[in-house]
Image (cartoon, rainbow, N blue to C red):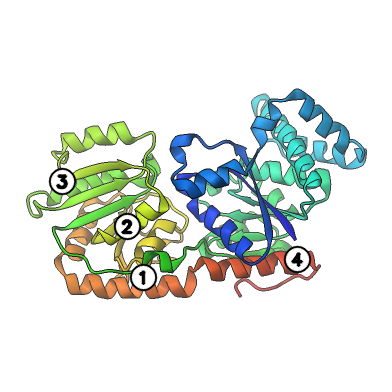
Amino acid sequence: MTLLYLTGEYPRATDTFIQREVAALRAQGLTVLTASIRRTEPEHLVGEEQITEAAQTFHVLEAAKHPLRLARAKLRLLRHPERFFRALRLAWRTAPGGLRNGLWQMFYFAEAILLADHMQRHGVRHLHNHIAKASCTVAMLASELTGIPYSFTLHGPDIFFAPEHWRLDEKIARARFVACISEFCRAQAMIFSDRPDWDKLHIVHCGIDPARYAPSPRGGPPHLTFVGRLAAVKGVPVLLEALSFLREELPELRVTLIGDGAERARLEQDAAALGLAEVVEFAGYRSQSEVAQALKDTDALVLPSFAEGVPVVLMEAMAAGRPVIATSVAGVSELVEHGESGFLVPPGDALKLAEAIRAVLADPDRRATMGKAGRARVVAEFDIAKEAVWLGRLFEVYAAGATHPGKRP
C-alpha cells in the first residue's frame, strides 16, 4: 500500500512525532510519501533528518504558484466531471459563513486539486492527515475528487475550540477512520459525530523510541528543563512566576527553555523583570538528539501549559527516567500519574507549581523512583514502534473492507 501523509507544515521542530510515525510505518514496509501545505521555514528545521525529509516532501502551495500546473491538474480531474463538481459542492457546503471564509474554502479546493493530481500520478491508495483543521479540509476535498479514501489523526485541543468552523462532524463522517491520540480526544470527537461513526474512532497514541532516551544518573546543581513553543498556550509566564518564589530558597537552580516562538522577546523581558536573567536560559530550537541529551542533563521536565493533547515531550522526559511536572489538562493524566511518575498541578497556579518543583528537587531518591515508573509507562503504552504497528493494522483492515477492529489493539 502506498500512503500519502499530509499536514499543514512538515517536517518541523515542534512536530517531530509525525516524522517518527512516518519512519516507523516505513520500517514496516509501507510506502509512505509526504506532503505539506506550506514549506517549513529553515529555522524550524532541526537536524539532518528533517532537512532530508523536507527535500522529498511535496509542497502544495509551491505547486499552486504555477498556474499552468494547476490548469493541467484541473483538466486531468475533469475527466471525471461528476466527482469534480461533487467535490466543489462539498467545498461550498462545508465553508464557514461569510464571504471571506468562502473565499478561503475555494483556496482549499484549489489546493485539493493539486494534491489530488499528485496522488493519482504517484499511485497513492490512501491519504492520511495530521491536525484536523485546514490541511484536513484539503484532504477531505482531495479524497472526494479522486475516490481515494482518507483518514486523519485528531489531536486537539484547539480544534475543539471551533469544531463547527472546521466541520469536524463532516470530516469524521467522511473519513474511513479517525486516529484519536487519547481517551479525552476520542470523547470530544464523539460529541461532534453521529453515533454510528463512533466505532471508527480509534485511539492511536503519539509515541517515541524509548531506546533513544536511555536513563542515566545525574549530579550537580538543580536543573529544570522546559521544551515547547514559546506561545501563550504553554503557560511559561506561570513558570517564571513560580521560579521567582523559589529564587532565594534555591539560589543554584537553573532552568533551560528549549523552543522558540512569538512570545520569546516578551518572556525574556519578563524573566529580566523578575530578576531571573541569570537563572533562565532561552536555548531556542534544538534537534531531537540535542533534546535527548538535554533531558539527561536535567532533574525534571516542567510543562505548565493551559491546554494540551498528550505532550510528546513528557513522553521523552519520562523515557529518559526523569520525573515531570505538568498541568492537569485534557489527556495529560492519561500519561502522567500524579505522585507516581511526576506531579500534576492546576493550570495557571504559580504557587502550586512552585510547590511541585520544590518537592521534586528535595528528594533525589523519589526522583529516581518516579523516573523508573515514568519510563515503564512510556515503554508499555507510548512506544512509537508498537503504535505504528497498530496504525498500520488500521490502514490494512479498512483497506480490506473490514470494520470495527476495536478502540485499541
Label 3 secondary element: helix
Would you say 80 lies left or right of 229 here?
Answer: right
Per the model, the C-alpha gap separating discs 4 and 2 is: 40 Å
Q: Amino acid at mark 1?
A: Glu
Would you say 104 lies left or right of 114 here?
Answer: left
Is residue 156 or residue 298 the one in the foreground?
298
Q: Amino acid at mark 4?
A: Tyr
| Label 4 or label 2, whichever comes before in sequence order | 2
Residue identifier under label 2:
293
Label 2 secondary element: helix
Examine the rendering and report whether any part of residue 340 can be seen.
no
| Label 2 or label 1, whichever comes before in sequence order | 2
Q: Amino acid at mark 2?
A: Gln
Label 4 secondary element: helix
Residue identifier under label 3:
244
Residue identifier under label 4:
398
Circle 3 residues within 10 Å: few <14, some 14–19, many ≥20: some
Is residue 304 or residue 46 the one in the foreground?
46
Identify the residue at image location x=29%, y=32%: 266
Mark 4 or 1: the one toward you: 4
Label 1 secondary element: loop
Circle 2 residues within 10 Å: few <14, some 14–19, many ≥20: some
| Label 4 or label 1, whichever comes before in sequence order | 1
Circle 1 residues within 10 Å: few <14, some 14–19, many ≥20: some
Examine the rendering and report whether any part of residue 14 can be seen.
yes
x then y, percent, for residue 21 = 56, 59
Q: Amino acid at mark 3?
A: Ser
Per the model, the C-alpha gap separating discs 4 and 1 is: 34 Å
Residue 337 marker: 1
Check whether the beta carbons of the residues at disc 3 and disc 4 lie within 8 A of each other.
no
| Label 1 or label 3, whichever comes before in sequence order | 3
Q: Can you say whether 17 is above or below 114 in the image?
A: below
